[in-house]
Image: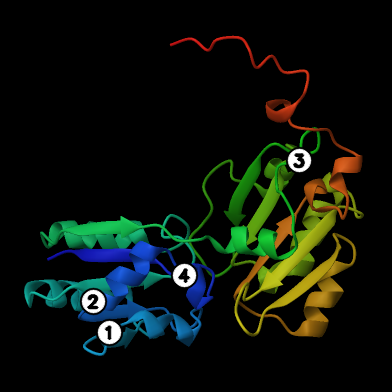
């Protein structure tokens, strides 16, 4: 038996991987984050599955379910919103499983920021505009940020910023970013990307906070900031060398 950490994607039941749906269909125990997950995702579970909502459980309680299920010989799936590689507490949970000698595997999922970018038809890396993406969060009622992980320092690079777990601090964050990226810098916010309640806000560093307040957003939203999010960023950018007609496609690559 194995405990499977499975990315549930941004929320839509049809944005799970084929592997994820197969694991859910075979699972005897499924732990899921009820706060962020569209209940329709659980339709992939078989009738034999015991469903455990983890939104009110701490890590030790969650781990107990994983360990107990494993030792009972059950197939256990721990669903995470988005992709397990981002803000999923994967490290904390797998460390506990290692200590309990429980085997585990990870199945990736579609990250929420990718679904948000897809919803507005944006590429986050536009030639001559931005070629890097910074995935980060902010410090509030959460684990302290590491030394050097300053939002303004990230912004100064010109990279597209993806802010998770930050929607309640939108106004203060935009005030922090304004002097670095400019008040006219585009901002896109997607609430519950791909889910029935999805809401998309488009604005700038100067204007987006008023929209967030008017919409009453408090959770489950991704904030995207950067010049690549402009309605027509290619007009100010360039084209990829990979597909350029000037690129020599006849030169043999080194073996």
Q: Quadrant of residue 62?
A: bottom left
Dots 2, 1 in contact, CB < 8 A: yes
Closer to the camera: disc 2 or disc 1? Answer: 1
Residue 206 % position (x, y)? 90, 62
Q: Dot 3 corresponds to which residue?
A: 126
Quarter of the image where the N terminus is located: bottom left
**Image point (53%, 76%), residue name:** 12
Residue 51 % position (x, y)? 30, 87
- Could you say whether the residue bearing mark 3 is in a helix, strand or loop? loop
Q: Dot 1 corresponds to which residue?
A: 46
Q: How far apart, in angstroms, are the residues tagged by discs 2 and 4?
A: 18 Å
The local crowd at label 2, few if under 14, some if 14 to 19, many if 20 or more residues have their Cα within 10 Å, is many
Closer to the camera: disc 2 or disc 4? Answer: 2
Q: Visible in this render: residue 63? A: no
Q: Dot 4 corresponds to which residue?
A: 81
Drawn side of residue 103 relative to residue 80, left or right: left
């Amino acid at each position: 038996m194995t405990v499977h950490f499975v990315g549930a994607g941004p929320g839509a039941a049809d944005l799970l991987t084929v592997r994820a749906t197969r694991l859910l269909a075979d699972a005897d125990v499924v732990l899921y984050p009820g706060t962020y997950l569209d209940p329709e995702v659980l339709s992939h579970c078989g009738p034999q599955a015991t469903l455990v909502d983890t939104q009110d459980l701490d890590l030790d309680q969650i781990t107990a379910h994983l360990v107990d299920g494993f030792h009972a010989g059950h197939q256990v799936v721990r669903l995470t919103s988005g992709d397990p590689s981002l803000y999923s507490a994967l490290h904390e949970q797998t460390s506990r499983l290692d200590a309990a000698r429980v085997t585990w595997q990870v199945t990736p999922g579609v990250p929420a920021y990718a679904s948000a970018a897809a919803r507005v038809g944006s590429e986050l890396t536009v030639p001559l505009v931005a070629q890097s993406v910074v995935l980060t969060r902010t410090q509030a009622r959460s684990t302290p940020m590491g030394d050097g992980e300053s939002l303004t320092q990230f912004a100064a690079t010109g990279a597209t910023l993806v802010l998770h777990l930050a929607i309640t601090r939108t106004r203060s964050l935009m005030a922090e970013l304004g002097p670095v990226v400019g008040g006219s810098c585009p901002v896109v916010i997607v609430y519950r990307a791909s889910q029935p309640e999805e809401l998309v806000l488009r604005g700038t560093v100067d204007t987006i906070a008023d929209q967030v307040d008017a919409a009453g957003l408090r959770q489950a939203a991704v904030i995207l900031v950067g010049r690549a999010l402009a309605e027509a960023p290619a007009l100010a950018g360039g084209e990829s060398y990979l597909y350029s007609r000037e690129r020599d496609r006849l030169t043999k690559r080194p073996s």
